[in-house]
Image: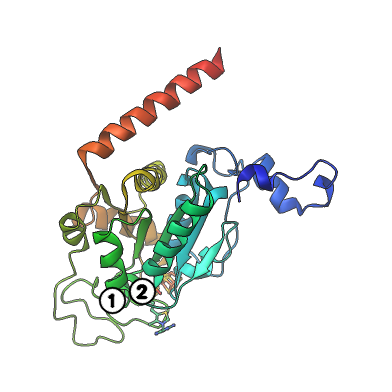
Amino acid sequence: MSFENLRPSPALKDFLPIEYKDLVEHGPYGKNKKVSDMGKFKEIIEEHPMCAGCAMTLFIRLMYIGMPNPEHTIVVGTAGCGRMALSQASVPFVYGNYGDTNAVASGIKRGLDIRFPNQFKDVVVCAGDGGLVDIGFQGLMHSWFRHEKFTTVLLDNEVYGNTGGQESGMTYKGQVMKMSPRGKKDDKMDMVGLAKVAKLDYIAVLAPTNPARVARTIRRAILIAREFGATYVQAYTSCNIEYSIPTPDVMKDAFDMEKDRYGFEEIISDRAKEYLKDLEAKAKAAKKKAKK
Ligand SMILES: Cc1ncc(C[n+]2csc(CCOP(=O)(O)OP(=O)(O)O)c2C)c(N)n1
Ligand code: SF4
């Protein structure tokens, strides 16, 4: 359904929930918002039941701000901590079964493209390392190698947080967890390496240390997926509970990790770079015209 279809008739406007009206009038429905304006507009997500200070929730808030058209977006996820926040947002959330998120997203995206040929409809898979890299690995790989036109965002807290601390394929080698008392034997899986093998047009790795960069990364990933197919964002989103990070130190941990082994990386294909350049030039020209 397009945003125009959703626009309430003036006679009914007063009866709509105030939350919805706020999103249209002051929030990011129909117009992009800047991270630097956070706090001044109605956000897509304002409440969630995740642990206090969880970096994953910060990342998720920024992800929604980065979406180019949240009112035209569907998020697909699965069991895990992230979905507790994703399912509270004012963007439709589809709860995939474990293992099928990327297959479900492929079907939704293909269906939307047929149903709405004149309107971009974005699909974003957003789930944890257990959900995507371990249990959802097969579907993830096929969506990448088929270049399905949606973005996958990996919330990498390097553990199964929601079920109490089992190691995942993304846990760092040697890490001792509550339910991996001898330490992980194998290396962290190289998902970026696999994304390169699949020749994705946009791959990014980041920690939520720079809010504007998170929003920009998500926006780029979604815009490029529309045009060229699968894109991948791998975000370090620490689990303060399972890694015993005191809540006041969550951001310090993110900065330390960024310095240590989670530095910002962005790999963009030549054709996607051209496309972004073109989009940015058009946006600048539109801004200039609006100022006149
Ligand atoms: C088919 C199925 N198997 C197992 C589970 C139990 N389960 C729920 S959340 C979860 C782990 C999630 O870990 P991850 O995807 O890394 O997300 P996190 O909670 O760390 O954010 C598991 C195994 C389930 N809900 N469904
Ligand atoms: S268990 Fe960990 S990842 Fe899950 S909400 Fe709590 S701090 Fe966040």
Is the residue marked 1 within 8 Å of ligand 1, measured from its CB? yes
Is label 2 in contact with label 1 (beta carbons under 8 Å)?
yes
Is the residue marked 2 within 8 Å of ligand 1, measured from its CB? yes
Q: Which mark is on residue 240? A: none
Image quarter hosting the C terminus: top right
Disc 2 crowd rating (10 Å Cα; few below 14, some 14-19, many 20+) is many
- Ligand 2 located in image quadrant: bottom left
203 to 33, vertically: above or below: below
Name the residue: 48% across, 69% down.
83
- Position of 184 with respect to 178 (left or right) is left
- Does any portion of residue 55 appear in the rendered image? no
Q: What residue sits right under mark 1 in the picture?
A: 134
Secondary structure of the residue carrying numbered label 2: helix
For the residue pair 91 and 266, the one nearer the viewer reads as 91
Residue 251 point in image, percent of width and height: 37, 56
- Position of 137 with respect to 42 (left or right) is left
The quadrant holding residue 262 is: bottom left
For the residue pair 87 and 1, the one nearer the viewer reads as 1
Residue 23 point in image, percent of width and height: 65, 47
124 to 215, vertically: above or below: below
Q: How many marks?
A: 2
Q: Which mark is on residue 131? A: 2
Amino acid of disc 2: Gly
